[in-house]
Amino acid sequence: MAFHAGSRIRGSTLQREQVVGLSYSSAAAGTIIASTAPIYAALLGALLLRERITANQIVGLLLSLAGVIGITLADSDSSGGNSPLGTALMFMGAISYAMYTVLGKK
């Protein structure tokens, strides 16, 4: 029961951080930053749950991130803000998502 209450809090925090972060940042930056969440989830899983990160997982994570960056930058019109606050909030959202997914495994 404790996880369920915590997951709702983390989930709502994640949404708030992403929405507020996007109001200060560009959609392209937000997309790229949000796509780093699986990397944080893998690292947190290794630290908290002692999950092993394989070479195939590392390659997959990096290829996925490279693909998101390539598609986002190719289609980006650079509209939107570029505030450090927006960037920080988007990173907090990505880390919140990673914590939410890792703690959900417990």
Image (cartoon, rainbow, N blue to C red):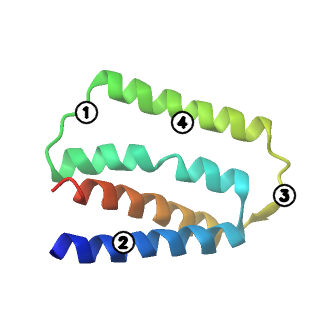
Disc 4 vs disc 2: Cβ atoms closer than 8 Å? no
Instruction: Inspect the image, locate mark 2, and give the three-letter code of the amino acid beneath it.
Output: Arg
* Residue depicted at x 48% and y 64%: 93
Residue 60 is left or right of residue 105, and the answer is right
Q: Which residue is mark 3?
A: 79
Instruction: Inspect the image, locate mark 4, and give the three-letter code of the amino acid beneath it.
Output: Leu
| Callout 1 secondary element | loop
**The N terminus sits in image quarter:** bottom left
Q: Which residue is mark 4?
A: 65
Q: Rounded to the nearest whole Å, what is the CA distance between mark 1 and mark 4?
A: 16 Å
Between disc 3 and disc 1, whose residue precedes? Answer: 1
| Callout 2 secondary element | helix
Residue 36 is left or right of residue 44, and the answer is right
Instruction: Inspect the image, locate mark 3, and give the three-letter code of the amino acid beneath it.
Output: Ser
Q: Which residue is mark 1?
A: 53
Residue 1 is left or right of residue 97, and the answer is left
Q: Residues within 10 Å of mark 1 (few under 14, many from 20)?
A: few
The residue lying toward the viewer, choosing from 14 and 21, is: 14
| Callout 3 secondary element | loop
Q: Which residue is mark 2?
A: 10
Query: Which numbered marker is on residue 61?
Result: none
* Residue depicted at x 71% and y 41%: 72
Instruction: State which mark lies toward you, 2 or 3.
Output: 2
